[in-house]
Amino acid sequence: MRKCYFDHVATNPLHPDVLEAMMPYFKEEFGNPLSVYEYGMNAKKAIEGAREKVAGLVNAKPAEIIFTSSGAEANNFALRGIALARQNEGRHVLVSRMEHHSILNSARFLEKSGFAVTYLPVDKKGFVDPDTVKKAITKETVLISVIHASSEVGTIEPIKEIVKVAKENNILVHTDAVATTGNIPVDVRDLGVDLLSMAAHQFYGPKGAGALFVKQGTRIVPLIYGGIQETGRRAGTENVPAIAGMGKAAELAQKELQARMDYLRPLRDRVIDTMANVKNVVLTGDRENRLPGHASFCVEYIEGEAMLLLLAAKGIFSASGSACSSKALKASPVLLSMGVPAGLAQGSIVFSLGRGNTPEDVDYLLGEFPAVIKRLRDISPFSEGWGDKEEGGECTVKK
């Protein structure tokens, strides 16, 4: 049976060159980077080399990169570390409703710790309006966190405009760039952000490796205490193989970025354009300003989990909602925040393409997916018009 992987926002296969770069640190170069003899010094050299490569990918200084175990840890570190470091200046934080759970749950932790949190609304395409940010700022606001792009709907946010508003009020800005780093150009100087999260497995690196960019001179309270690793900002013996792999993946991403985008966009557009002709299928997110390999939809009258199962039976692997919540069988909070009715949001599906996908893979998807929709609609208990209007917003579907 043909197998086609269309869930690259969940994770990516390891690039062969990355695996090769990691292997010595599992075997010959196994030392602890804090050790002062040869094995330790070689491990330390690998970490610092990777730090330079990751910094190069986002136009940062090596000293501004702190390695973490994941993008989720980087998000926790940013939100909690900055809020605690600046609590004497103010106790108010802004986050968007489009955020990953690692941001939203960190925000809820801050609320329980005595901070006020404002959850910024988004429009029907998933954009955060900089004017809305401006109106939500108070004298107590110390941090704004807005995702760079949603892995669920693909919309790329106007971070530069939000930063401009923040800087007028001496407020730090963090962006969760897990979905964008290594997939589109990400330049911390151009964006103007103070903190930025990333994860290696989103650009063909290993799982278990992430990083947080912290602009030089920014005070941050550690999330993990214990040792002097990462200049005292993140304790724990470093995962040298994973960090070395992240460095190699960053190097490859920087070199291949334009070619990857140029390859994926036409494949993505074929998926979007073909599905636009299928009745009652709604594109979610912005049509143009979205991740290059990302196509997401809501399909009326049927449920996302059913689509996933039938597609998987045909060797097509995709997602419904975010990777962290797709097993919860709940309407996506991201889609609900965009005004999508709960019933329609239950029919969400996401196809995210990667460098290993071929035009033949897309042909196969576009041949099978409409047939899956028809089969499920034929047995659906819901009738034409279900989900058109529900509490929480209006549904606009293609008739």
Image: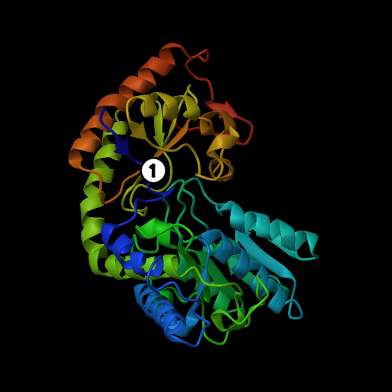
Q: Residue 104, image x and y in percent?
A: 64, 55
Q: Residue 63, image x and y in percent?
A: 47, 84
Residue, x 59% and y 43% (percent of image)? 333
Q: Residue 110, image x and y in percent?
A: 73, 63
Q: Is residue 372 left or right of residue 10?
A: left
In front: 38, or 17?
Answer: 38
Which quadrant would residue 283 be assigned to in this image?
top left
Q: Quadrant of the C terminus?
A: top left
- The secondary structure type at the circle numbered 1 is loop
The residue furthest left is 360
Q: How many marks?
A: 1
Q: Residue 6, image x and y in percent?
A: 34, 41
Which kind of residue does numbered mark 1 sit on? Asp
In front: 375, or 71?
Answer: 71
Residue 292: tell me if it is visible.
yes
Kindly identify which residue carries mark 1: 7
Residue, x 52% and y 72% (percent of image)? 238
Q: Is residue 205 left or right of residue 69?
A: left
Vertical comparison of 39 with 83: above or below: below
Q: Quadrant of the N terminus?
A: top left
Local crowd size for mark 1, using a 10 Å CA cut-off: few (<14), some (14–19), many (≥20): many
